[in-house]
Amino acid sequence: MSQIFEIAMLIAFGFSWPNNILTTYKNKSTKGKSLAFLLLIDFGYLCGIAAKLLSASFAWYVLFFYILNFCMVTADIVLYFHYRRKENFKKAS
């Protein structure tokens, strides 16, 4: 039962990331973004992945959601660096 609640939590968090990524992509800006926050969230997902891999009751379906969320946050971090570089280039010009 605890794994079902864990999956529900991961799905709830997971629904916010595609919207966050899409907003970054549409705005082409890092305004309002916190790199430290994104990195901390990714670190948390990495810890969750490690915990699942080390768990005696390994459940691949829970691990899947950790990996999916980690990948979405990582995509947002990549967009952050991409648009941050462009913003810095515009400031320098």
Image (cartoon, rainbow, N blue to C red):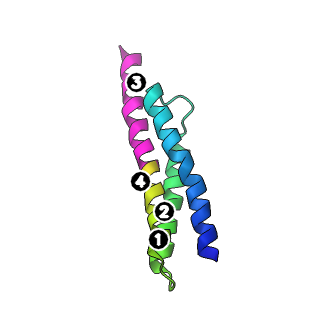
Q: Amino acid at mark 4?
A: Cys
Callout 3 secondary element:
helix
- According to the image, label 1 marks what residue? 61
Query: Badge 1 local density, few (<14 within 10 Å), some, or many (20+)?
Result: few
At a point 47% along the width and 36% down the height, the residue shown is: 22
Contact between labelled residues 2 and 3, with CB atoms less than 8 Å apart: no
Q: Earlier in the sequence, mark 3 or mark 1?
A: 1
Disc ID at residue 71: 4
At a point 50% along the width and 86% down the height, the residue shown is: 56
Q: Which residue, as the protein is rendered here, is positioned at the far bottom?
A: 56
Disc ID at residue 88: 3
What kind of secondary structure does the magenta stretch mostly adopt? helix
Q: How many marks?
A: 4
Q: Which residues are magenta?
A: 73-93
Which of the 4 quarters of the picture holds residue 83? top left
**Residue 40 or residue 49, whichever sits in front:** 49
Per the model, the C-alpha gap separating discs 4 and 2 is 10 Å
- According to the image, label 2 marks what residue? 65
Query: Badge 3 local density, few (<14 within 10 Å), some, or many (20+)?
Result: few
Per the model, the C-alpha gap separating discs 4 and 3 is 26 Å
At a point 51% along the width and 46% down the height, the residue shown is: 17
Which of the 4 quarters of the picture holds residue 33? top right
Per the model, the C-alpha gap separating discs 3 and 1 is 41 Å
* Disc number lying in front (3 or 2): 2
